Image: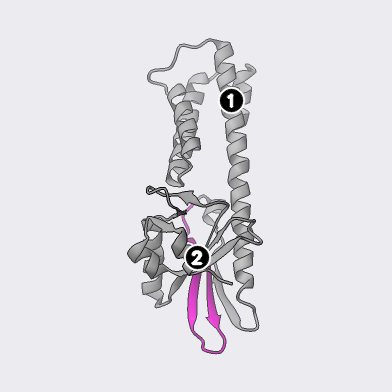
Amino acid sequence: CSVALLFLTAIGTRDSFGFLKWEMLGITLILATICFSSRRYYWGAVFIIFAVLFNPWVPPKLSRAEWILIDTLLSLSLIYWSLDYFRNYHKGLLFERLVQSKFPEYKYVLVSATKDLHKKLRRFVESDASPDFVFREKSTRDEFAVECKYRSNYAIGTRSDKGIWWEKSQGERYQKYAQKNNTPVYIAIGIGGNPKSPELISFIPLEIIQKQYYRFIPQKVLEQYRQI
């Protein structure tokens, strides 16, 4: 929709450029916030630049040709970002399927699985804040939850060490779930390779991460909890 509005304005079939500025300002600020919160700083900086260009208070004095170029660049950025976002979403889905296969039906009952309904309903769904899966072992009837995270590559921490970033607030949400349901939570982490066959898969108890590694999980810890 945003890309269509930019296109119509650029070719001159839509004249309300003032209203378009407000629309693009809101969209770019929202996307910048999403990017920075997910540590995609490059994209965050790109959308901040566009937000400055489209701000309605101190607009830059540019020619129509220059605005057409900016509209085109923003349209391409929105398209590329959307494709990148859904590609990463698909990777996460493939990794979730792999994790689920690690708990075969003859040994485990799949009690529940989140559906990310808030993305379709555009509204927060409380159950989607739960871990991805809850399993029950048939022999013991013990239940446990698993949250899945896939990363294509290791990140570099503040000490130049390899690992992955972890948001403490996200862990706190799963801690509340664990306490409320008296159910242990494990974080399944896949790194490298592809989502169907990562180079490394780790299952780490959430309490270990929250107590010691709530901002950055080093590679040595991921290796320690590697699943063969």
Q: Quadrant of residue 51?
A: top left
In the image, residue 70 above or below residue 186: above
In the image, residue 152 above or below residue 83: below
Which residue is located at x 43 percent, y 58 percent?
218
Q: Secondary structure at mark 1?
A: helix
Q: Nearer the viewer, residue 205 or 223?
A: 223
Colour mode of the rendering? one colour
Q: Quadrant of residue 228?
A: bottom right
Q: Quadrant of residue 214?
A: bottom left
Q: Which range is magenta?
A: 123-146
- Three-letter amino acid code at disc 1? Leu
Earlier residue among tags 1 and 2: 1
Query: In the picture, which quadrant includes the N terminus?
Result: top right
Which residue is located at x 44 percent, y 15 percent?
60
Residue 227: image x %, image y %? 55, 71
Residue designated by label 2: 223
Q: Is residue 176 left or right of residue 226?
A: left
In the image, residue 91 above or below residue 210: above
Please give the label number shown on residue 73.
1
Q: Is any part of residue 125 visible from this angle? A: yes
Which residue is located at x 57 percent, y 86 percent?
138
Residue 91: image x %, image y %? 62, 54
